[in-house]
Image (tube, rainbow, N blue to C red):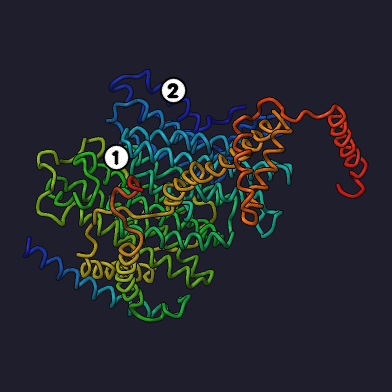
Amino acid sequence: MEIEKKYLFRMLYVCLAASVLAGVLVNFHEQAHAAFLWQEIPGFSAIYGFIGCILIIVVSKALGHHWLQKEEDYYEKH
Amino acid sequence: MIEWMHPGLIFILGALLIPVLKGKWKKIYLLLLPIVALIDLLYMSKGVFWRLPLLEYELVFGRVDQLSLVFGYVFVIAAFCMTLYALHVKEDGQHVAAFLYVGSTLGVVFAGDLFTLYLFWEVMAFSSLFLIWYRKTKASSEAGFRYILVHIFGGICLLAGIILHLQNTGSVAFDSFNWGTGWGYLSSYFIFVGFIINAAVPPLHAWLSDAYPEATVTGAVFLTAFTTKSAIYVLIRGFPGVELLIWLGAIMAVYGVIYAVLENDIRRLLAYHIISQVGYMVAGVGIGTWMALNGSAAHAFCHIFYKALLFMGAGVVIEMTGRSKFTELGGLYKYMPLTFWLYMIGAFSISGFPLFNGFVSKTMVVESAAQSHLPIIWLMLEGASIGTFLHTGLKVPYLTWFARKEPVVEAKAVKEPPKNMLAAMGVTAFLCVFIGVFPQALYGILPYPVEYAPYAAGHVVAMSQLLLFTFVGFWLLRRMLHGTPTITLDTDWFYRIAGKRFIWFCEKPLLDFADSIDKALKDIADSFVWFSRNPTAASRIMVLTIGAVVARPFNPAYMHYERDLEELRRMYPGESVHRVAIGTGVLLVLMFFTLYLVIYLTHGVLWV
């Protein structure tokens, strides 16, 4: 399992690098198509994906922790 | 002239025979009906059929054009997959409810006038209710009641809108409605609210995430497809290009994602992703360009398959383990790998991985937002994609099939599900991949001509980057995503808690207040009765009482009057002590009449 995990992660790194590289190449080719400014940044989707993911988790967890999440029998008790 | 048989009728009439058949024949019959309906649909010509005069109006049961056909196809094909999934269910009632549900949805899709639409709309709500109630738990019965109350409210809004619309225009034809601001558009607003309740647009969405997770394992799979997607169909018909929908849709897409983070129940998480995905469709309707409307229809088409597949996977887990909470799941991969991989096809599809069907439809809506120059909407929709993959593609499979070395339930109970369930998942998964690989098969049947190439290098690379780096974020924060044994408050709070408090307010303080008014009036009436028993003695008592209260502080000698007063009260009404002459009585009567005369004469002069 451990070896397999290592192998999988090596594959992931290759994929990550390949996607960013491909992004740079495509940007070079298709710059005229960009509808928004940020689409001209190479690797914008990668940055957005990573930051978006972290933000979604952190913001939702904060919302849930401070406000929305209640114990399971909340509706029976209230 | 019957050019074709209404496909909805095949399901509705077909449902009646289900309880009569037994064993193998019933199974064959159940699977045959959707196939017959599909053949019927494939041979249907476009046009307006099945007009039925009613009073001075004309009911149209069959308006067949490319838009209604797309939805018709997907509903019938999905019905086949779902029936296959539910084939092992013994209770006839569940099959009957499901078939009525499918049939009435097809009725909505082909309805050409508002009365027919309303009729099938209500049948849809009530037949789907039984798919929830057949779970036969306390939670499902309560959730079912809330579900139907919300839908009855939605139905009433729709009916009110239809009646106003009829009054304004004199027509019951179901075409696009006028939209603007002001009282003149009231009918459109009512119909709009009726529609967006079924589309689960926040804040009117809580019925979905409340009720779907409580439905039966097989019933929930049916529920995922029909109500919300038929709502998208009627929105495309009735409100294309209404700008409000763009924002509602984008908010929906993000809203579902945020709630999905907090969910501990596997099907509730997936239910929030229905809301999120339907958000793309709603936004597409709002953008209203050909490409956007195509995108909405296409996304509805694809969504039905992958969401059904995801609910099938979650249903299998619940069926086999009896658990639905992430805190009680995990470590199932060893025992049900096939279910895992089939589920993952659904997960890749909903996330919009290239070569899966979500990619060819979702990007259409997102791209149309770009073409219409809506940067914030574009960012919100792309952001929702991140969350979609994060939850359905990573959190759910991680917490269900991995995360633990061994499942918490007994190992021998955990195995792959019955063959029909696996077969249904297989067929649905095949369709997801097929449409992803050959998008032209879908694009060819869309209502408007398609000029969109999903597999342009830019799209593929951007989506791959987005999803791959989402995985990096997930892996870093995966500890934060473990389920917690909690529930999450949503807008159903307003009718579950605030509503309860309102009822309490009506029953307690408001009713007490009413009682006190009641009592005061009765006291006044009582005092009149008391007074009339012996008016003279009563007036004496009153005068003395006032005298005793007012004069006592100034004149201590007044104290002894109180003794008289007590005596009088004790004797009351007793014999009238002071007899008055008849003349006094006559005088009183005369005074009364004079007063009456004065009132009579001055009425309308001095006062009204």
Q: Residue at x 24, y 46 (%)?
A: B324
Q: Which mark is residue B16?
A: 2
Q: Is residue B504 above or below residue B490?
A: above
- Please state which of the two labelled residues, at mark 2 or mark 1, is closer to the viewer: 2
Count of numbered tags = 2
Instruction: Have a look at marks 2 and 1 and say if they share a chain.
Output: yes
Q: Residue at x 45, y 48 (%)?
A: B501
Q: Is residue B112 visible?
A: no
Q: Quadrant of the N terminus of chain B?
A: top right
Please tell me whether mark 2 sits on a helix, a strand or a loop. Answer: helix
The chain under label 2 reads: B
Residue furthest to the front: B557
Judge the density around disc 1: few (<14), some (14-19), many (≥20) Cα neighbours within 10 Å: many
Label whose residue precedes the other's in the sequence (2 or 1): 2
Could you tell me the amino acid type at mark 2? Leu
Tag 1: residue type? Ala
Residue B559: percent from the left, percent from the top? 60, 47
Position of B455 relative to B55 (above/below): below
**Who's the residue at 50% across and 29% down the image?**
B9
- Residue B380 in view of the camera: yes
Position of residue B545 measured from the top left corner of the image (x, y, whole percent)? 65, 44
CA distance for labels 2 and 1? 24 Å
Is B54 on the left or on the right of B314, as rendered?
right
Question: In the image, B229: left or right of B354?
Answer: right
Q: In the structure shown, which secondary structural element does the residue marked by tag 1 occupy?
A: helix
Q: Which residue is mark 1?
A: B424
> Which residue is at the front of the view, B178 or B183?
B183
